[in-house]
Image (cartoon, rainbow, N blue to C red):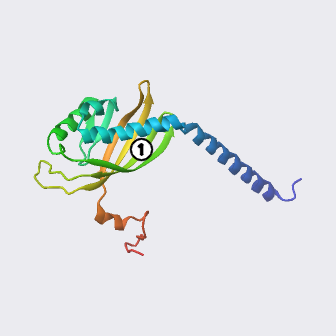
Amino acid sequence: MLSHPSRLVSSLFVVVVCVTGELSMVGMAAFAQDASENKEIRTVVAGYADAWNRHDVAALANLLTDDADWINIVGMHWRGRAAVLKGHDVYHRTFFRNTPLDFTDIDLRPVTQDAVIAVVTIKVGDFTPPDGQPRIGTQDRLSLVIAKGPGGWRIVHGHNTVIEPGAQQFDPVNNSWDPAGKAE
């Protein structure tokens, strides 16, 4: 019948790879938000910076879902909008009351048609937390999960992390650090 069964297997493999690739592209297109939704999502992200800089907890409330979670820079986990607002309110009335925030990069990654992950690079101004040790401005990375609901796009989850400058040289993905522990 078939003089070269391996050719049939190879041909089937190519067909499967092509079909899988096409389905993947269709799937990703289904997750893509249109331009107006992308603008709405970016408005939510920018709204966080605006609320922070005005120390306006009421404005922040409008950006969050009722069941929002927040993990702050030192690992405190606040569950629910009321807790997230209380944490921000107390800190903005005290040691963040004069601390500016500036978003330097916003990267959006659609997860589904109604959910996006925003990874935001932030410059945070100087502040002195309750331990009394002044913190000179930092660069942070904020991850936000933003979902579309009946009220539009809202933040479901936030997690802030300080970018430690000294550790960046040891990043095996984004620089020349090798697995043996030596910079190339």
**Residue at point 78%, 58% (across, down):** 6
Q: What percent of the width, then of the height, locates residue 17?
A: 68, 51
Viewed as shown, does residue 111 lie left or right of 4?
Answer: left
Q: Amino acid at mark 1?
A: Ala
- Does the image show residue 80? no
The part of the image, by quadrant, that contains residue 27 is: top right
Compare residues 60 and 1 and report the one nearer the observer: 60
Query: 24 above or below 89?
Result: below
Mark 1 highlights which residue?
118
- Helix, strand or loop for disc 1: strand
Q: What percent of the width, then of the height, locates residue 99?
A: 21, 47
**Residue at point 26%, 35% (across, down):** 84
Compare residues 9 and 132 and report the one nearer the observer: 132
Q: What percent of the width, then of the height, locates residue 94?
A: 14, 42
Viewed as shown, does residue 110 lie left or right of 83?
Answer: right
Viewed as shown, does residue 97 lie left or right of 24?
Answer: left
In the image as oriented, which residue stretches furthest toward the top?
A: 150
User: Total label count?
Assistant: 1
